[in-house]
């Protein structure tokens, strides 16, 4: 599991969490077939258009094609210019016959090649009336002061999206307000309210839960788009009740993996150079380096380059502020190692010696040791290890048969929180957030997330643990009580790599 860029991906079980946005070009006729020119055909004496007619709904599109014929009706190559008799009904691109339905009615599309012409009919009908309305997320968990957006969709009887104007309302604006026309939700105070999207006689609802939260944290939110991904670091503080993106340098379209300096004055983040691949991560192009930035002025102050190898990720700042541990990898998906670098810059030092697939390192509170998870030679499952910060002694903490990963030290240095994968039962995968003594003894479950989990992080007072799932970030008390979801990412996004401030 540690072979993936965990700070961004949230991880390896995320298949099907994200969806690529689809472009819909719907026509009621069959697609036209490519023209095969007859070898030895003579000069073109006639042209024809296929299909002979298109029936479209306003807003839909289709394509005409043209072919030529010689005197013996053999297929010839032909270049045509397209035009519409009434562009207010349907437009057609001159070069390729691409038609867009504009308004109800009918018009003629003409293909012209020299003195030769051929025509086809385009009939445009109004959209069918909507029969159902839905909201992108029927349940939204947010923290006070945060701003999110709900998206409503109407469909007709065929499942085609219907264009309507929605009016939004919140049943209890004291808990959360919603923009009347845009679905933008602003969390006001702890509680629950129902948000309704209405279009004529149709409506749909979503439950918005505003969760009480104290403290400050940061995390990575990654979203999918056509051809790739984008990620931002979001920060939140209950003192000012603001959830907002960290302003980034103009040189980066994506950043991830935040780690605070001990003074909270600086952050080390992954500056992402490339992040492409399908939503199921069957292959991925990913590269990043580490940068140090002033937390208060990240949008205007210089970003200091820390690494330059293009495969550095998952940073962790030492308690004394002098060093940063991270995962360094020569080639994505191949074996990697844990490295250390001075926070002021310089040459990195490899900390691990055994070949393996290492996950994010975390410093012990006293700065003498680093915990991480790894697949190493001779071990079939991901396990938790603790390594002295000088690389002299390595201890395997979890020698069991189950897969354990993403360890995090408690503030007193006496316990570890980590994720345990218990395996597949009845077609479902089971993950636990567990806490153990530093030597791996006295393991107890504190949460059983409903799906894949990653990156548990202790609160500074040691009373709570935050972790990530595809459904959002959760917080649970260290004794296993009060499991609460505090973020709900959009449908095409996921949250990961939380860190308390």
Image: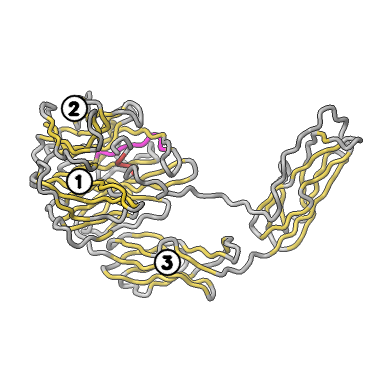
Determine the image quadrant of residue 278. top left
Looking at the image, do the residues carrying marks 3 and 1 touch, with CB atoms under 8 Å apart?
no
Circle 3 or circle 2, nearest the eye: 2
Read off the residue under disc 1. Answer: 418
Work out how far the residue at label 3 is from the one at label 2, CA to CA, in angstroms.
52 Å
Residue at point 21%, 51% (across, down):
433
Determine the image quadrant of residue 294. top left
Residue 317 seen by the camera: no
* Residue 40, horizontal then vertical, whole percent: 84, 27
Q: Earlier in the sequence, mark 3 or mark 1?
A: 3
Read off the residue under disc 3. Answer: 179
- Residue, far front: 426
- Most foreground residue, 398 or 362: 398
Q: In the rendered view, tell whether residue 472 sits above or below residue 198.
A: above
Where are the magenta residues, as a range? Answer: 268-275
Asked whether 273 falls inside the magenta stretch, the response is: yes
Element type at mark 3: loop
Q: In the rendered view, tell whether residue 482 sits above or below residue 377.
A: below
Circle 2 or circle 1, nearest the eye: 1
Residue at point 84%, 46% (across, down):
118
């Amino acid at each position: 599991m540690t072979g993936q860029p965990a700070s961004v991906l949230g991880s390896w079980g995320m298949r099907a969490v994200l969806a690529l946005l689809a472009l819909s070009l719907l026509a009621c006729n069959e697609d036209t077939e490519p023209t095969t020119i007859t070898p030895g055909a003579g000069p073109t004496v006639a042209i024809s258009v296929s299909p002979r007619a298109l029936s479209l709904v306003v807003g839909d599109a289709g394509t005409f094609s043209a072919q030529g014929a010689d005197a013996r009706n053999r297929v010839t190559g032909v270049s045509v210019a397209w035009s519409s008799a009434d562009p207010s009904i349907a437009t057609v691109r001159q070069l390729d016959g691409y038609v867009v339905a504009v308004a109800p009615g009918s018009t003629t599309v003409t293909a012209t090649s020299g003195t030769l012409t051929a025509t086809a009919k385009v009939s445009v009908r109004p959209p069918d009336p909507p029969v159902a309305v839905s909201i992108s997320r029927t349940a939204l968990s947010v923290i006070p002061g945060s701003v999110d957006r709900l998206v409503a969709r109407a469909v007709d009887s065929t499942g085609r999206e219907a264009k309507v104007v929605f009016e939004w309302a919140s049943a209890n604006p004291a808990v959360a307000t919603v923009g009347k026309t845009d679905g933008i939700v602003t969390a006001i105070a702890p509680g629950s309210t129902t948000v309704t999207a209405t279009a004529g006689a149709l409506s749909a609802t979503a439950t918005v839960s505003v969760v009480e939260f104290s403290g400050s944290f940061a995390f990575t939110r990654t979203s999918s788009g056509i051809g790739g991904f984008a990620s931002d670091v979001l920060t939140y503080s209950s003192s000012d009740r603001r959830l907002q993106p960290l302003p980034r340098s103009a040189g980066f379209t994506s950043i991830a993996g935040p780690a605070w300096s001990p003074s909270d004055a600086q952050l080390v983040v992954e500056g992402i150079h490339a992040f492409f691949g399908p939503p199921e991560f069957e292959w991925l192009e990913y590269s990043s380096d580490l940068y140090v930035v002033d937390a208060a002025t990240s949008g205007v102050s210089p970003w200091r380059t820390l690494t330059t190898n293009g495969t550095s990720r998952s940073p962790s700042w030492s308690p004394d502020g002098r060093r940063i541990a991270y995962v360094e990898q020569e080639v994505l998906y191949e074996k990697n190692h844990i490295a250390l670098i001075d926070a002021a810059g310089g040459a990195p030092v490899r900390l691990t010696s055994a070949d393996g697939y290492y996950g994010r390192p975390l410093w012990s509170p006293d700065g003498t040791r680093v915990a991480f998870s790894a697949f190493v030679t001779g071990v079939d499952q991901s396990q938790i290890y603790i390594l002295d910060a000088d690389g002299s002694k390595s201890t395997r903490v979890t020698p069991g048969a189950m897969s354990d990963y993403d360890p995090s030290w408690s503030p007193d240095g006496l316990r570890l929180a980590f994720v345990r994968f218990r395996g597949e039962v009845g077609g479902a995968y089971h993950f636990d957030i567990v806490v153990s003594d530093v030597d791996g003894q006295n393991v107890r479950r504190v949460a059983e997330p409903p799906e894949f989990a990653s990156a548990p992080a202790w609160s500074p007072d040691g009373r709570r643990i935050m972790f990530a799932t595809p459904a959002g970030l959760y917080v649970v008390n260290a004794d296993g009580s009060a499991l609460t979801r505090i973020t709900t990412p959009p449908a095409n996004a996921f949250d990961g790599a939380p860190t308390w401030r």
